[in-house]
Image (cartoon, grey):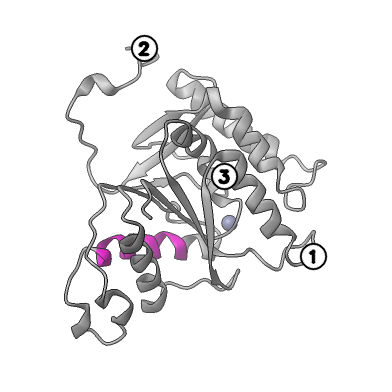
Amino acid sequence: MTYDTLVVAAHPDDAETQMGGTLAKLARLGQRILLVDLSDGEPTEFAKRGVRATQAADAAKILGVDRMCLGLQDRLIDDTPATRLAVASLIRQYRPQWVYGTSDACVHPDHAAAASIVQAAVFLARLGNWDQVPQGDLLADQQPWAVHRLFFPHCKMEPAWAQFGFAVDVSEVYDLKRAALAAYRSIFAPEDRLLALYEAEDQYFGRLVGTRYAEIFRSHSPLVVDDPTVFAPGMHG
Ligand SMILES: [Zn+2]
């Protein structure tokens, strides 16, 4: 089995928060999407162990994506050779064209680790001769795989970006993003305003690009198109 898109995030709810609308949109377009949580997000402050996994499964169903957990320890995710190789192996196994990580410079050390792990994994997945590398067993029997693109959505724990590579208009699918985040009842208590603030950010970037809601992304490589007519209309041309 292969996937069109692989999303790697530190905790269940990260991908939904950062790019849930984009995931819903891509799934509606027919893409096969696998969301990889590096950890199960346990322990959480507001629920017993295991509740978050059920909520994560519900959220994935709402968005139309598959989901798996790599089993690293929440709070202690580290960018090590082993974690890089584990993610590189998933990339080789599922052969995605597009990979999404977590934006770097994150407040949460798990998010920062996830960003560098994914970037390294995308690079390592392309290389051969792993049978000659100590610890390289995991990749030795897999074919190299080069992805088309690696993108980083904005992490909402970080200050707003003044500049970004591109924005995705998620207005039409925003109800699905809202529903996916609402599945995390033990993470986002109804009385706290976090979800409202997240939504305000998506509205803010929507305002900047001329839509109701938008999610923003960066790419470390220059953005190139075959056909410049793919761009949506700009607010001021
Ligand atoms: Zn997180």
Q: Determine which quarter of the picture holds residue 139.
A: bottom left
Percent position of residue 219, x then y: 31, 45
The magenta stretch is 113-125
Crowding at label 1, few (<14), some or many (≥20) Cα neighbours within 10 Å?
Answer: few
Instruction: Give whichever of discs 3 and 1 has the lower sequence position.
Output: 3
Crowding at label 2, few (<14), some or many (≥20) Cα neighbours within 10 Å?
Answer: few
* Image quadrant where one finds the C terminus: top left
Residue labelled with disc 2: 236
Percent position of residue 75, x then y: 60, 69
Percent position of residue 135, x then y: 31, 85
Closest to the camera, between mark 2 and mark 3, is: 3
Q: Determine which quarter of the picture holds residue 217.
A: top left
Instruction: Tell me the kind of residue under disc 3.
Output: Glu
- Vertical placement of 207 versus 157: above or below? above
Kindly identify which numbered label has been placed on residue 16.
3
Contact (Cβ within 8 Å) of mark 1 with mark 2? no
For this view, does 189 lie left or right of residue 148?
right
**Separation of marks 1 and 2 at Cα, in angstroms:** 50 Å
Kindly identify which numbered label has been placed on residue 48.
1
